[in-house]
Image (cartoon, grey):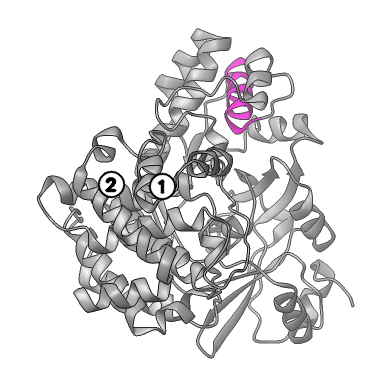
Amino acid sequence: MRRLCSATLDTLPADVIRPAYDRTAVKAGVVHLGIGAFHRAHQAAVFDDVLNAGDLRWGIVAASLRSPQVRDQMAPQDGLYTMLVRDGASRRARIIGAVQRVIVAPQEPQALLDALASPDTHVVTLTITEKGYKLDPATGALIEGDPQLAADLASLAAPQTAPGYLVAALAMRKAQGLPPFTAISCDNLPHNGQRLRNAVLALARRHDPALAEWIAEEAAFPETMVDRIVPATTPEDVAALAARLDAEDRAMVKTEPFIQWVIEDRFCGPCPEFGAGVQLTAAVAPWEEAKLRLLNGAHSGIAYLGGLAGIDHVHDVLALPPARAFVEALWDEAQTTLSPPPELDIVAYRDALMARFDNPTLRHRTRQIAMDGSQKLPQRLLAPIAARLAAGQGIGALSLAVAAWVRWQAGRDDLGKTHVVDDPLAGTIAARLAGADTPEERAAAILRLDSVVPPALAANAAFRVALARWLAILETQGALAALATFQEKI
């Protein structure tokens, strides 16, 4: 079958939305590091809106810091791909044309540096996950033992990390008399802008203190919050779209109608005239906190409990009344720890979240959400637990979600089916749990993992007891029984 590309645009079905701008006239004002499905369904779609509105300065040069897979999918398609927006029976296909080129950084490091140092580049966005910042979660210092970072500490001639590329490119811009770019982290991390700034400045100081000072004074690293559910694309999705378009699109993404991007209004150069779905604000933290503790906290609980029960998709978990009651209770607990901005209606936000979770067409996989739990739980679940305990409040739902994460580390669900624990600390956690014979000992072993659990929270007796109690139920009776027990108690 023919591939989606510029030559096939005019032959697509009439209801497929196409770029309304001349792609040959677009300048690459954005470089994105870490291109994946989320970027293609979120930031790239936002910049595509800007291009469609007539400002052609905001095309994207995207880079993969590891695999050539996305480049190999998109290059034969001239950078075009389909964003399929699905909500129940409604399906809307839109061709995104914002991505002009995909660079595989290990193969073409200089090409990426040249793109970052280009006078046309005003904004750099990143979706590299927490691991990509090369910062110790506990101390915030550079992880100097990381082989890639060690190479960048020795030389930035051919960077290997995202901070390395940014520092090397900013050095090039400074030498050429160009202003710095605005670097925007789009990862689901608290204080993501500050983390990115810290990583860049720490690495820059090791190479050139004067460069670090210039970056600190002139560059911008806004805080941001992003939200859109982007399930993994399956071969069946590709085949179904190909039948509809009469053209194969190996880079397609599927997503929901909802999109949100909250950006701190701190740019050091040109800022796009963003459209719907993007909000510039003086303070991102309240938005971020609500999203992490309501959307992401519930997602983690759903992922581990549903995954343990052998349920593959979020909407199928929420079809169970005890699971639905659990999510509402978790929100009740987490909501008391929030300080939402006036523009955020928490009641309406919760209703919107449940509608998104119920969307059956997304088929958002529990195992996809379950990845990298040790990196996610501190912000999503442990922080609200600490806040509620400090206020003398209960933690029934939140502690059940954490216990389900602990149980997930065993690598086997309640049906006996094995799964890979996809987590950077999987080996460390497995070693800790290997010597623990009872739920109480396993809970204690996890609480001693101070890179995940803050020591003050680990020392809290109420949390330790709650965690061990839920873990015992999960281990002996399973996730569905734990949810039923929870529902009986609320």
Q: Quadrant of residue 207?
A: top right
| The image quarter in which residue 322 lies | bottom left
Question: Which residue is identified by label 1?
Answer: 442
Q: 486 or 367, which lies in front?
A: 486
As helix, strand or loop, the secondary structure at mark 2 comes to helix
Q: Provide the residue span drawn in magenta.
A: 161-177
Q: Position of residue 416 (x, y in %)?
A: 59, 69
Q: CA distance from mark 1 to mark 2?
A: 21 Å
Location of residue 73 with respect to 31 vertically, above or below: below
Dot 1 surroundings within 10 Å: few (below 14), some, or many (20 or more)?
many
In the rendered structure, does residue 165 fall within the stretch colored magenta? yes
Q: Residues within 10 Å of mark 2 (few under 14, many from 20)?
A: some
Q: Residue at x 74, y 56 (%)?
A: 24
Q: Most extreme residue toward the bottom, as rendered?
A: 89
> Quick one: quadrant of the C terminus?
bottom left
Provide residue 61's location: percent of width, then percent of height. Answer: 68, 46
Per the picture, the main secondary structure of the magenta-coloured stretch is helix
Q: Residue at x 50, y 87 (%)?
A: 88
